[in-house]
Amino acid sequence: MDLGKISSGKGIMTTHFYGFEPCSIETGSTRERIGVNPLDRAKYILSVRNVL
């Protein structure tokens, strides 16, 4: 559905969180982190400040 077309650009769409179900390991995917890990606060702050 293209809300913009139907409402001539004046439409508003409202949503709400219904819930979730955990996915199995086979369904989900994992990948290696690219760049600095934001959980390593010291290195992350340095990378944001372009010091690293």
Image (cartoon, grey):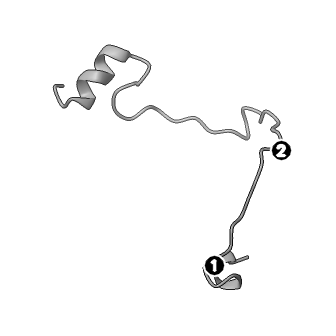
> Tag on residue 13?
none
Q: In this rendering, would 18 be left or right of 34?
A: right
The residue shown at (73%, 41%) is 27
Instruction: Report helix, strand or loop for mark 1.
Output: helix
Up the image or down, 41 lies above or below 3; here it is above
The residue shown at (44%, 19%) is 39
For the residues bearing labels 1 and 2, Cβ distance under 8 angstroms: no
Q: Position of residue 33 (x, y in %)?
A: 43, 32
Q: Position of residue 40 (x, y in %)?
A: 38, 16
The residue shown at (38%, 35%) is 34
Q: Pick the residue in front: 37 or 24.
A: 37
Q: As shown in the figure, which amino acid type bears the numbered disc 2?
A: Tyr
First in residue order: circle 1 vs circle 2:
1
Q: In this rendering, would 40 be left or right of 29?
A: left
Q: CA distance from mark 1 to mark 2?
A: 24 Å
Q: Which residue is mark 1?
A: 4
Q: Position of residue 17 (x, y in %)?
A: 78, 44
Up the image or down, 29 lies above or below 41; here it is below
Q: Nearer the viewer, mark 1 or mark 2?
A: 1
Q: Pick the residue in front: 43 or 23.
A: 43
Name the quadrant containing residue 41.
Answer: top left
Q: Position of residue 3 (x, y in %)?
A: 69, 76
Up the image or down, 51 lies above or below 14; here it is above
Quadrant assignment for the C terminus: top left
Q: Name, please, the residue furthest toward the left.
A: 51
Q: As shown in the figure, which amino acid type bears the numbered disc 1?
A: Gly
Q: Which residue is mark 2?
A: 18
Instruction: Report helix, strand or loop for mark 2.
Output: loop
* Total numbered circles: 2
Q: In this rendering, would 7 be left or right of 46?
A: right
Q: Pick the residue in front: 6 or 21.
A: 6
Q: In this rendering, would 34 be left or right of 51?
A: right
